Image: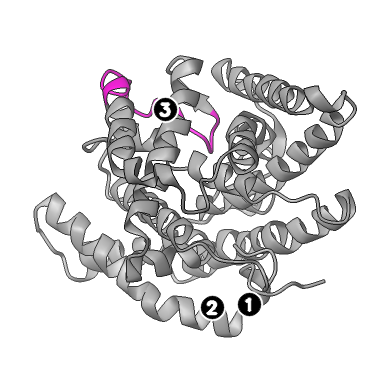
Amino acid sequence: MPETAAKPRYAFVDLAKGICIMLVVWHHVASTWGLETYPLKEAVSLFRMPLYFFLSGLFFKEYAGFFDFARRKVNKLLIPFAFFFVVLSCIFPFVLWYFHLRANPGAAVWYSFVWKQNFPNIPVWFLLSLFWTNLIFYGLYLASKKFPARYTTAALVALSVAVGLVGFFLGRYNIKLSLFWASSMAAIPYFCAGHIAYRYTKILAPNRFDRFNIPLALLGFGIVALLSLKAPPESVSYVSNRYWIPVWMVYSCGILGTLAVLLLSKAIGKLPLVSYYGRYSIMVLVTHGWVQWGLIKILRESLHVHWPRPVSLAVVFVATMLLYLAIIPFMRRFLPHVTAQKDVF
C-alpha cells in the first residue's frame, strides 16, 4: 500500500505480502468450506496478520505532523475500509437476500463493526484496525520524544509493550472494546518492532548478513511450528482479539514468523504472480471473501461436485487467485481512490 508515488518499492516486501495474502485467502477458503484444522494452521495464524502490522511500522514516517499523517492514513486505510464495508458488507448482502441467495443480514449489519465486530466480508476489519494502530503508535512516538534523547527508543518500546499487553489481556479476559480498538492495541508491539527494525537494522538493504537469510528463515519457521504444536484449535485470532496461549508465545512467534517470511522473501527476491498479489494485496484482502464464496456456491449448489475435500479446496483457492489476474486490473482502472492507489484528498 504505497504512501506516495515516489516511494521506492522493495521487491521482496511485495513477495512477503503476497505470501501472506495467499495464506489469508487459503485460511478463509478452508473456513468457508468447513475445514476446522489443517497442517500448520495454528503456526501460520501466529504470524499471518502480524507481518502486515510489522511492515507498516517498517515504513512508518512522521511526515509533516500528526494531522498530515492522519490524512494520509485516512486515504490509504479508512476510505478503503468505509467503501468496501458499505458496499460488500452492507449493500451486497441485501442484494443476495433479494435474490434468495443468502439469509437476510438484518439492519444491524450497517453498524455491526462498531461493537459486534462481526459482519459479512469480515477481512476488511484489518484496514480499520491498522488505521487505529497507526494513530496509536504515532501518539506513543510523540510521547517518547518527551524523554531525554538517549532514552527515546527505550521509552517507545516500553510504551508499545505496555499498550500491547493491555490489548492482549483485554482479549484474554474477553473484555470488548468498540471499533477493533483492543485488537489494534494488541498489535502495537509488532508495529513498534517494524519501526525499530528500520531504525537499527539493514533489513531493507542488501547487507553482509543476507547469506544467512534462508537458514535463519527456516530456523524461525521451525521454532514457530514447534511452539505451536500443542496450541489448541483457534488459539489466536486477531480479528476477535482472542488468545489461548501464553503472551510470550504469541509475540515471540508473531515476530519470529514475520522475520522468517521477510528473510525468505529477501533471499528469493521476486516471484512474478505472488509478488503481483502482494503489491495489490489490499485489493485481494477486501474482495476475496465474496470471490471464494461464489466459487464454493457454484461448486456445491450448481455443479454438485463431490470431489475429495483437499481437491475442492485446492480448486477454489487456485481459481480465486487466478481470477485476480482480471480483478486487480479492473480495480486499478475503476477504483483507484478506494484501493489506496490514489488519494481522495
Spatial CA distance of label 3 from label 2 is 34 Å
Q: Dot 3 lies on which element?
A: helix
The amino acid sitting under disc 2 is: Met
| Residue in the foreground of this view, choosing between 99 and 43 | 43
| Residue in the foreground of this view, choosing between 238 and 1 | 1
Q: Which residue is mark 3?
A: 253
Spatial CA distance of label 1 from label 2 is 7 Å
Q: Is residue 292 above or below residue 34?
A: below
Q: Is residue 38 magenta?
A: no
Magenta stretch? 226-241
Q: Is residue 118 above or below residue 99?
A: above
In this view of the protein, can residue 138 be seen by the observer?
yes
Q: Please state if 278 lies on the left or on the right of 131 as rendered.
A: left
Residue at 45% in and 55% down = 17
Residue at 63% in and 77% down = 336
Q: Dot 1 lies on which element?
A: helix
The picture places residue 143, in percent across and down from the top left corner, at 86, 30
Q: Is residue 70 above or below residue 87?
A: above
The amino acid sitting under disc 3 is: Cys
Name the mark on residue 331: 2
| Residue in the foreground of this view, choosing between 342 and 93 | 342
Residue at 61% in and 46% down = 58
Spatial CA distance of label 3 from label 1 is 35 Å
The mark that comes first in sequence, 3 or 1, is: 3
The 10 Å Cα crowd at callout 3, few under 14, some 14 to 19, many 20 or more, is many
Q: Which residue is mark 1?
A: 336
The amino acid sitting under disc 1 is: Pro
